[in-house]
Image (cartoon, rainbow, N blue to C red):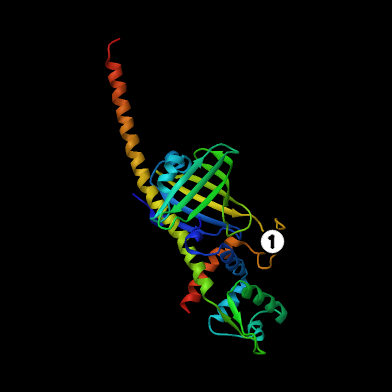
Amino acid sequence: MELKNNIHPSAERLNATFAALSDATRRAILARLAQGEATVSELAAPFAMTQPAISKHLKVLESAGLIVRERDAQRRPSRLNAAPLAEATQWLAEYRQFWTSSFARLDGLLEELKDTRKKNKKHKHKHKKHHKEVPR
Amino acid sequence: MMYPDSFQVSTPSDREIQVTRVFDAPRALVFEAFTKAELVRKWLLGPPGWTMPVCEIDLRVGGTYRYLWRQEADGKEMGIGGVFREIIAPRLLVATEQFDEAWYAGEALDTTIFAEEGSTTRMTITVLYESIEARDTAKRSGMEHGMAASYMRVEELLLSLLAA
C-alpha cells in the first residue's frame, strides 16, 4: 500500500529513487558518498569496475537527483543529495504505518465479530430449544 | 489476545514483498474480513485521517475489486484495483494489483494465504512485482533489478545514510 499522494509531490521522482537504489553498486556508491564527496576514480577503486562503468552508475544516480556532480571542476567530484532519500524513507515508514494501523483496527473488528457470532449462536441455540419445547 | 508483534515485512525474492500478521480468530472469520466489502472498509484504512469512500469486491475468479482512500484533511485520494485470479476460501486469494498512480511499472500479483495456527490465523500477503525485463517498456537503466529487493535494502541504506 502506498501513500505517496499524501507525502510526495511526484510519484515519478519516488520511482526514480527506488529504481536508482535497486542496484547494489549504486547503493555502495551512496554509502561511500555519505562519508564525503569523491571523484570517479576514488569511487571506482573499491569495485572491480572500470571508471566508465562507474560513470554510468553516477549518471543514473544524478538523474534520480540522489547525487550532485560538480560541473566546473575537472575532477567533477560527486556529492550525496539527501532530500530524495529522506522522502523515500518517509514513504517506507508510511507503508509500515499503513499496515500497522489497519491490522490493529482489524484485531478490534475480529473481536467484535467473534462476540457477535457467539451471541448469535447462543440465541439460535435457545431458539432451537424453545422450538423443540413447543408442542406440536 | 492480539499479536501486533507478529507483523513482519520481508522480501523473499528480488521481486517480492511479503507482509505477515497473526490474528486471534478462526480462519474463516479472517478470510471474511479480507473479502467482504462491508468488513474491509471498516479496517483497511491506514493511519487516522483516512477514509475509504470506495470499497467494492466482486469475489469470484475474473471478478474485480476497487478501493479508494481519501485523506479528509486535504482531500487527497489514492486508488487501487485488480482482478481475482484464484479463490480457495478460506485459505487462498490471488489477485492482480494496480495502483492508480503506481511507483512501480506494470501490475503486481498479490497472493494472500490464510493459515491456521492453533486457534489463531496467520495471514501472509506476497506481492510479486512484474518483471521489468518481461515488459519491454522499461529499457531505462537502473530498472534491471527487482524493485522489491530494492525496497527493503533501501530502508537499511537510508537509515544508515541519514544517520551518517
Asked if residue B90 lies left or right of residue B142, the reply is: left
- Kindly identify which chain the residue marked by label 1 belongs to: B
* Residue type, mark 1 in image: Ala
Secondary structure under badge 1? loop
Pick the front one: B137 or B112: B137
Residue A35 against residue A7 in the figure, above or below: below
Query: Can residue A107 be seen in the rendering of this structure?
Result: yes
Query: Can residue A25 be seen in the rendering of this structure?
Result: no
Pick the front one: A30 or B77: B77
Residue A22 against residue A78 in the figure, above or below: above
Q: Position of residue B46 (x, y in %)?
A: 43, 54
Q: Residues within 10 Å of mark 1 (few under 14, many from 20)?
A: some
Residue B110 against residue A2 in the figure, above or below: above
Q: Position of residue A6 (x, y in %)?
A: 47, 60
Asked if residue B37 lies left or right of residue A79, the reply is: left
Report how many numbered discs are placed on residues in the image: 1
Asked if residue A55 lies left or right of residue B98, the reply is: right
Q: Which residue is mark 1?
A: B138
Q: Residue furthest top?
A: A136
Say which residue appears at 58% left-offset and 74% top-offset.
Answer: A66
Q: Residue furthest front?
A: B74
Say which residue appears at 50% left-offset and 50% top-offset.
Answer: B124
Q: Position of residue A96 (x, y in %)?
A: 45, 59
Q: Position of residue A94 (x, y in %)?
A: 46, 61
Q: Residue furthest bottom?
A: A74
Say which residue appears at 71% left-offset and 77% top-offset.
Answer: A53
